Image (cartoon, coloured by chain):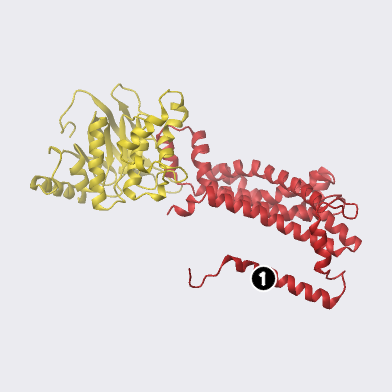
Amino acid sequence: MEHKDTISPLWGIAIPVIVIIVWEICAIAINNSFILPRLGQILPVLAEPFNDLMGCGSLAGNAVISLKRVLTGFFLAIAVAVPLGMLMGRYQPVYILFNPFFQLLRPVPPIAWMPLAIAWLQIGAGSMIFIIFLGAFFPLLLATIDGVRGVRETWCEVAESLGATKFETFTTVVLPGALPVIWNGCRIAFGIAWMCVVAAEMLPGTSAGLGFLIMYAYNMGQVQIIVAGMVVIGIIGLGVDFVFRAVDKRYLSWRALER
Amino acid sequence: MEGAGTMMQSFTLKVDHLKKQFCEWGTPPCLAIEDATFSVNKGEIICIMGPSGCGKSTLLRMITGLESADAGVVAASDGTQVFSPPMAMVFQEHALFPWLSVYENVAYGLNLAVRKKSGTDLHTTVMEHLALCQVDTFADSRPYQLSGGMRQRAAIARALVVKPDILVMDEPFSSLDPRTRLELEDEILKIQKKTGTTILMVTHSPEDAVYIADRIIMLTGRPARVKEVIPVPFSRPRDIADPAFISLRLYVNRLISG
């Protein structure tokens, strides 16, 4: 089958392959593994993700630690942002009360909260989860408000006219009606949360996680471990995003199909 | 004006001096409906008509309780205030829940807490109503896979499944082409004959109204009051080419335009 102006999705791997080849050529030319390690140094690290590295645990083990932190912060953010966003999207007084406050906090980068987070929650998982929570909270809140506003009033009135209570209308109409937009917000929020965890782990005082592993490898001059850590971060981010999109396509596609 | 049609012994619904004002911040209150008074007899098909923007939809929403009235009452024959369960509403278009299948849409009302423990067999009831409205072959389809006419049939099934005393419809044909409209009107007449449901609908088409209604309630422009109640004396099936039909249609048309 031939389509005008379209190419096979397999072409998507072309640029990564070119980058890897150029990387390798430059690595050979520079010949300094502190600047550009060769593929032959990076791949063995990636090939054995369960091997201990520099006494700091394995790639996989640190990835699991980072993922646990990010999921905790992410689910906390969902638990707060989605109900609050639904109320803000549906009830104007709630919106008026909360919106200026959140708009004021929103431009502050999550990492800027780190000193306060450490002061309040001490160094460790607590302060990192707080940072992740903040990173995921705002995109989730905005998406939920947006999604709820996109719910047709007619749908709610149908429910009411059939005898649904306010609460039933919320759970059986507003939530499913807003879900595609909320889900997209989750996807964006997870991406930000994932960036936050790695950044938070790079700060002094942490002792595990992919961000920590990368910083430790930097201090030890193990550039191949830095690059391997970055590759793992990228792969996990890509994998999670793929799951988000697959669920969207399978269960939430009605929004695109509804004219 | 009242009782211009054939008065029956008991009426299902009495709309008594309903009034509605719209108040918005910074603007003087605007009187939308001055006085709506009429009654709807059991098993009747009533069409509410009027110039565009006269508040037909607002009136319908007040009757179903979706909007509150500033004065007046809507009462059932037994004297009680009527609220939504005895009435079910069909909207203009795009009112099916797009994330549910047609079957799940129709089952929606039966899954609500108010009816959950009534003990009726959900599946049988839903299938009966899908068949009644002739959308049973689309049970597993999603609303976006359906044509406009089929969507409205499904919407009617969803409303009828809760066994409303009155089926309330807000311009249910407005997004359909003429051929589909006629088909759907015949379908509604058939359903009405089978179920005996009282029907109250808003339409802007004189032809629809004269074809389907027992009586037409004609409203004036804003602020709306009842201008005239027009009985439609023709037996069914009605012939849209019949001279008497045409002259009544033209009469209704003249009333709307002024």
Q: Give the SS element for disc 1.
A: helix
Instruction: From the viewer's side, name the closer residue of A107 and A256.
Output: A256
Residue farthest to the left, as pictured? B243
Count of marks overlaid on the render: 1
Q: Position of residue A80 (x, y in %)?
A: 65, 42
Q: Give me the chain that's yellow.
A: B
B184 vs B159, left or right, is: left
Q: Which residue is mark 1?
A: A15
Residue farthest to the bottom, as pictured? A29
Q: Residue at x 47, y 28 (%)?
A: B113
Residue B160 visible (yes or no):
no
B155 vs A91, left or right, is: left
Q: Position of residue A190 (x, y in %)?
A: 67, 51
- What amino acid type should be assigned to the residue bearing mark 1? Ile
The N terminus of chain B lies in quadrant? top left
A76 lies above or below A200:
above
A257 vs A198, left or right, is: left
Q: Residue at x 78, y 76 (%)?
A: A25
Q: Give me the chain that's red.
A: A
Q: Position of residue B194 (x, y in %)?
A: 25, 31
Q: Position of residue B58 (x, y in %)?
A: 34, 41
Q: Label 1 is found on which chain of the structure?
A: A
B18 vs B253, left or right, is: right
Residue farthest to the top, as pictured? B78
Q: Give neighbour class at mark 1: few <14, some 14-19, many 20+ (Cα, 10 Å).
A: few
B155 lies above or below A234:
above
A47 lies above or below B109:
below
Q: Quadrant of residue B132?
A: top left
